[in-house]
Each structure stands twice: as C-alpha cells, then as structure tokens.
C-alpha cells in the first residue's frame, strides 16, 4: 500500500526479473512513482501490449554486465532515463479510461439484453 508507494518514490530504478504472469501492478506503480523500470522479457513482459517499455529497458537474456551498465547509467543520469518512461506512464494513465469504457460497454450490453427479454 502506502509504504510501497513511499519506497518507490524514494527509488530511482525498479528492477523486475520475475516471471510476469500477467499485466503486473508493481512495474506500473514504480513508473508512476518516477522510477526507471527495467525488466526481463518473461511472460507478459514479452508483449508490447502488456508492458510497453522502450526495448532498451527489457533484457531478453540475463547478461549481468549489460544490466549493470544500464542500472549504473539510470542512477547516474536518472532524469534523462526517467523521461524515456513518459510514454509508458501516459499509457498507464490511459488504462483507467480504457477500463471505464470497457465496463460501460459491458453494462450497456447487459441492460440492453434485459430490456430485450422483457419486451418479448
């Protein structure tokens, strides 16, 4: 909850090399908190529609030297790398609007079907 968000706001980089079983909440929270998000390409992280990060922040192989260089650069030049997260942050912000639109369409369909059944 609040403790996680507070920690993320103090952090510069969020690293997630887990299995990414679905559209994960923590990378999104981290990006909104100002972190540079660095992931692998496992599971949902492999798909642009689930985790639309610039490719330089996604590692297909666990290459320690390359990851170390990226992390070092992200900390040293945080503002520069954090700006590269802006399209991802905008995408995250758009998800709420998209979810509302989906729910509205669903409710409209349910109501229309009930009305159609009552008319019969």
Image (spheres, grey):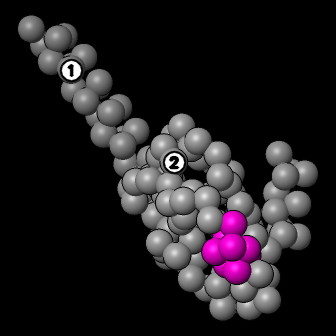
Rendered image: mark on residue 113: 1
Q: Residue at x 17, y 11 (%)?
A: 117
Q: Of residues 61 and 78, which is closer to you in this image?
A: 61
Q: Position of residue 24 (x, y in %)?
A: 59, 46
Query: Secondary structure under badge 2?
Result: loop
Q: Quadrant of residue 68?
A: bottom right
Q: Position of residue 50 (x, y in %)?
A: 45, 52
Along the polypeptide, which appears first: circle 2 or circle 1?
2
Query: Secondary structure under badge 1?
Result: helix
Give the residue pinned by disc 2.
42
Q: Residue at x 40, y 39 (%)?
A: 103
43 left or right of 16? Answer: left
Q: Is residue 6 above or below residue 65?
A: above
Q: Is residue 61 above or below residue 11?
A: above
Magenta stretch, residue numbers: 64-71
25 left or right of 112? Answer: right
Kindly report the secondary structure that dominates the magenta region of the rendered protein.
helix
């Amino acid at each position: 909850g609040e403790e996680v968000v507070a920690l993320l706001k103090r952090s510069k980089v969020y690293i997630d090399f887990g299995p990414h079983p679905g559209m994960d909440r923590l990378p999104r929270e981290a990006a909104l908190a100002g972190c540079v998000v660095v992931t692998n390409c496992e599971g949902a992280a492999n798909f642009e529609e689930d985790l639309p990060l610039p490719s330089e922040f996604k590692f297909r192989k666990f290459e320690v030297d390359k990851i170390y260089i990226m992390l070092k650069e992200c900390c040293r030049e945080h503002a520069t790398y954090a700006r590269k997260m802006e399209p991802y942050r905008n995408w995250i912000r758009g998800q709420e609007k998209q979810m509302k639109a989906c729910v509205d369409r669903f409710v409209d369909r349910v109501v229309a079907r009930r009305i159609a059944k009552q008319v019969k």
